[in-house]
Amino acid sequence: MTRSTVDPVNTLGARGIGRVVGCLLLGVLVGVVGTVMHRAVVLDVDLPIALVLCLLATASTGILARAWTGYGGLLGYGLGWVVAVQILSLEGPGGDVLVPDEPIGYVWIYGGLLVVAVVAFLPRRWFADQPARRARTWEGGAEPFASAPETRAGQFGTHA
């Protein structure tokens, strides 16, 4: 294979391992911040706006991890997220919990897992570095007007 045909996302060298570790740390960070903030009250509204924002952050950083390093990065991100959320869901030394046994806590835990799973099943072409469509080829392989004579004014097809 020549250097131009090697997919840098699928080759796992030192840079790829560093990216996967970076995605793992990103998952830990998002899991910690989301676990702490998912029950926050925003604008004195009784709607779970903070939960929705935390799930959106989980989705956007999951997409970033997959786009940056492919499935390896998404796996690292998901592992970091799950470990952080599960550790912070345990009862603390004083009996305090960050994720209580309430519907909002279940939505955070299982909704976040679902979000990471949805990111894993997004179409591969959304994360490809190639253009979405190939260039159109014309009959005979030539561009249109390629054989038309060019005038002094630079206009095609006018024989003035």
Image (cartoon, rainbow, N blue to C red):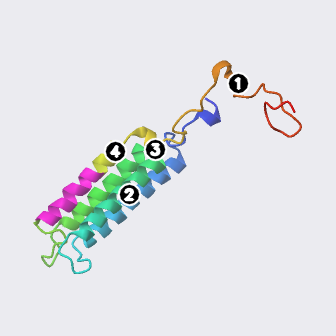
Residue 7 locus on image (x, y percent): 54, 38
Which quadrant would residue 33 be assigned to in this image? Answer: bottom left
Report how far apart the C-alphas of labels 4 and 3 lie in the structure: 11 Å
Q: Which residue is mark 3?
A: 127
Q: Earlier in the sequence, mark 3 or mark 1?
A: 3
Report how far apart the C-alphas of labels 2 and 4 lie in the structure: 12 Å
Q: Are marks 2 and 4 in contact (CB under 8 Å)?
A: no
Quadrant holding the C terminus: top right
Q: Amino acid at mark 4?
A: Ala
Taking depth in this image into account, of 10 and 121 the one nearest to the observer is 121
Up-down: is 126 above or below 101?
above
Up-down: is 136 above or below 82?
above
Report how far apart the C-alphas of labels 2 and 3 lie in the structure: 13 Å
Q: Earlier in the sequence, mark 4 or mark 1?
A: 4
Quadrant holding the N terminus: top right
For the record, the magenta segment spans 103-115
Q: Residue at x 49, y 39 (%)?
A: 10
- Mark 3, Cα crowd under 10 Å, few <14 / some 14-19 / many 20+, is some
Q: Depth-wise, is mark 4 or mark 3 nearer the camera?
A: 3
Q: Depth-wise, is mark 2 or mark 4 nearer the camera?
A: 2
Q: Amino acid at mark 1?
A: Ala
Q: Which residue is mark 2?
A: 60
Q: Residue at x 26, y 80 (%)?
A: 43
Task: Reply yes or no: does residue 111 show up in magenta.
Answer: yes
Residue 88 locus on image (x, y percent): 23, 67
Question: Helix or strand or loop: what does disc 2 sit on?
Answer: helix
Question: Helix or strand or loop: what does disc 3 sit on?
Answer: helix
Q: Which residue is mark 1?
A: 142
